[in-house]
Image (cartoon, rainbow, N blue to C red):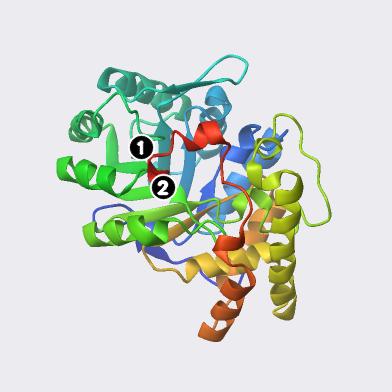
């Protein structure tokens, strides 16, 4: 698959040892249109066989479908071969509507109970609130999670999409393994205020959206339409003139990729891997072919000059559109 052996790093100063890249499973449960369970399962197996142990999910992905899928896929594997990272707290309606966030202690204990059952395991490696609940002090949420660590139901506590102040408050209650947050060539907002705090406190970063939901790849360049249930059908960066502007940036990146005989996605992943050992890209893949492409990025070496060329070709301040629709942006503590 690749000549590179997938190395491991410690996730933050208190977190688990994880593979240098992780597998994000959200797309296997309909977030980007229809997915195939058999191919998704084969992709999970391919990822583990390639040396990856970090698998990321959320209890609300496909209303539990994602956890059930992963649970079946890892049932025949040794439990210690997989690091399960699970998000909780997002509330959904039966039509897929958004119902806000619930991070109350009694709610998270309930969410955890169902996650353990669906995944078929007796503990989770990393558990994290998907979003900050404005009605619940972060100290209350982390305090309840710390009790679950003590009881052995979770091994590590993580955070997701929160800002510097919330990170400090959470870390004052219990050690935080990592912050999961969007980070890519065209989403570099964490560099100003968030990344300095995580590095000061020894908290790792699990970076999602490294391919900007397929924008930083070859899949959208030739023109694409998105099903109504595809996240990108409602994402500002994929709409009209915004998409046209963003694809101009991707074309510039494609020229650099072609000069190195790699794909746009591989170049975007390779860039993310240069940002620090504390940053672990979590790449969404629904098919084995995509996973093979992902792992190939580990072979790419980028010089300082090449990095400068890449960043000049895709200036983060030239990206058109927010990374989420306005209503969802309002729920991101990391953006406030």
Instruction: From the image, tell me which residue sits under label 2.
Output: 180
Q: Who's the residue at 81% across and 41% down the image?
A: 225
Q: Element at badge 1?
A: strand
Residue sitting at 69 percent across and 57 percent down? 246
236 shown above or below 60: below
- In this figure, which residue is indicated by the disc labeled 1? 128
State if disc 1 and disc 2 touch (CB < 8 Å): yes
- For this view, does 208 lie left or right of residue 297? left
Looking at this view, name the residue that lies furthest to the right: 222
Quadrant for residue 293, please give it: bottom right
Q: Which quarter of the figure is the C terminus placed in?
A: top left
Q: Residues within 10 Å of mark 2 (few under 14, many from 20)?
A: many
**Could you tell which of marks 2 and 1 lies nearer the N-terminus?**
1
Q: Is residue 93 visible?
A: yes
Q: Secondary structure at mark 2?
A: strand
Q: Which mark is residue 26?
A: none
> Pointer 1: residues within 10 angstroms few (<14), some, or many (20+)?
many
In-front residue for pair 160/332: 332
Q: Horizontal and vertical percent for residue 104?
A: 29, 22
x and y percent of residue 194 in the render?
Answer: 34, 55
């Amino acid at each position: 698959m690749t000549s590179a052996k997938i190395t491991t790093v410690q996730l933050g100063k208190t977190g688990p040892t994880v593979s240098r890249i992780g597998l994000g499973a959200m797309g296997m449960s309909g977030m980007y249109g229809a997915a195939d369970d058999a191919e998704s399962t084969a992709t999970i197996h391919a990822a583990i066989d390639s040396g990856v142990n970090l698998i990321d999910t959320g209890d609300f992905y496909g209303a539990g479908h994602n956890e059930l899928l992963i649970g079946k896929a890892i049932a025949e594997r040794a439990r210690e071969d997989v690091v399960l990272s699970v998000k909780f707290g997002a509330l959904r309606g039966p039509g897929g509507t958004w119902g806000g966030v619930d991070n109350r202690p009694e709610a998270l204990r309930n969410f955890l109970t169902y996650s353990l059952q669906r995944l078929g395991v007796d503990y989770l490696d990393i558990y994290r609130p998907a979003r900050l609940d404005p009605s619940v002090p972060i100290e209350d949420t982390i305090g309840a999670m710390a009790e679950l660590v003590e009881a052995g139901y979770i091994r590590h506590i993580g955070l997701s999409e929160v800002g510097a102040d919330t990170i400090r408050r959470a870390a004052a209650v219990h050690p935080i393994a990592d912050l999961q947050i969007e980070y890519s060539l065209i989403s570099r907002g964490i560099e100003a205020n968030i990344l300095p705090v995580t590095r000061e406190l020894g908290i790792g970063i699990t970076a999602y959206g490294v391919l900007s939901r397929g924008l930083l790849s070859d899949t959208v360049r030739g023109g694409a339409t998105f099903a109504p249930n595809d996240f990108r059908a409602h994402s500002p960066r994929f709409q009209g003139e915004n998409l046209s502007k963003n694809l101009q940036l991707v074309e510039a990146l494609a020229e650099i990729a072609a000069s190195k005989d790699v794909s746009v996605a591989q170049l975007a992943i390779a860039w993310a891997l240069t940002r620090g050992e504390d940053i672990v890209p979590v790449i969404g893949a629904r098919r084995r072919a995509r996973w093979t492409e992902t792992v190939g990025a580990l072979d790419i070496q980028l010089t300082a000059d090449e990095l400068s060329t890449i960043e000049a070709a895709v200036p983060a301040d030239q990206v058109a559109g927010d990374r989420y629709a306005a209503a969802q942006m309002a729920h991101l503590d990391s953006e406030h």
